[in-house]
Amino acid sequence: MTDDENAAVDAFEGLGLTSYEAKVFIALHQLGAGTARDVAEVTDVPRSQVYSVAESLENHGLIEVQQSNPIRYRPVDIEEARNTLQRRFEREQDRAFEYVDTVKNEPSGEETQEDIWTVRDRDRVNDRTVDLLSQADERIIFGTRLPELVTDSIERVLAERAAAGVEVVVVSATEAVRNRFAGVDGVTVDEPPAHRTDDQRSGRIVVADHDSILLSVLGGEDGETAIWSSGSVFASVLIQLIEAGDEVR
């Protein structure tokens, strides 16, 4: 098979077909119609397997069967097949997530542990940052030395929370970061303590209310890695230690 055909088979497998089903379906579109022998001649599907595979494709609504001697198969048109596979994929998706939804809150019987999570990859760290910021009701401290870590989504959510009455403080040793928020109503811009020396691996810090925190570092294959915690004793204690050490003001 060509690379393109292999890719098509892989794609059909992603939609719920088996490899043989995908190959037979593609072969029938190449042939227009054909017998099991015809299909076996243009694919690596054994002739003995074509019959059961064709029966499965018929049950899926993807081919039609002519009761002749020998039996002939004809695929449904592409748009009909597309709609059939889409509906099937959506049904399977609903069934899978409905089950997950029924079991997600069931007690596991395991001992409760502190929720301390690791997030890798800059985009995922950014998504988690936005999520923590958007849930703050009382105050936010956001700090970074790198302008590129202040994404549009972060800038937007900080402005939105400030407009909602949340106390928002942006801390940065970098003038470009401070200037970005200088004209935003409700946002206080500050510099870190003079005694602090920036680590070139430092990424960003987020404190949301008194019980949510995220700290990230740069480097490695993932570009940025963060630990975060929300609603835990770990988060509360770490926030208190940071404030007591005057790391952010």
Image: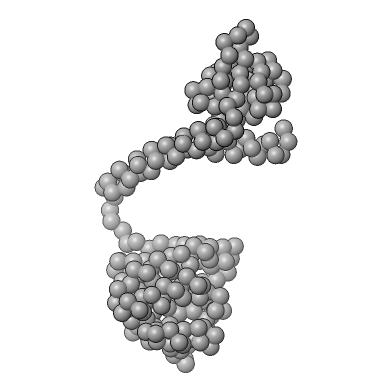
Decide if residue 129 is in sight here: yes
Residue 19's x, y, as percent? 59, 30
Return the residue found at the far top: 69
Q: Is residue 167 left or right of residue 142?
A: left
User: What's the residue at 59%, 29% (across, down)?
Assistant: 77
Residue located at (68% from left, 15% from top)? 37
Question: Which of 150 and 185 lies nearest the eye of the viewer?
Answer: 185
Q: Quadrant of residue 48?
A: top right
Q: Is residue 141 left or right of residue 57?
A: left
Residue 153 position in % (x across, y down) = 47, 70
- Where's residue 139, x and y in %? 32, 78
Looking at the rendered image, the quarter that the N terminus falls into is top right
Q: Is residue 239 above or below residue 31?
A: below
**Quarter placement of the C terminus:** bottom left
Q: Is residue 34 above or below residue 97?
A: above
Query: Which one is in front, 80 or 112?
Result: 80
How far from the left and from the top, in percent, is residue 224? 53, 67
| Left or right for 171, reference 221 | left
Question: Which residue: 57% across, 66% down?
Answer: 223
Above or below residue 109? Residue 222 is below
Examine the image and state in which quarter residue 214 appears. Answer: bottom left
Q: Which residue appears at 41% of the width and 78% of the height?
A: 159
Does residue 241 appear in this view? no
Q: Nearer the viewer, residue 210 or 90?
A: 90
What number of labels is visible?
0
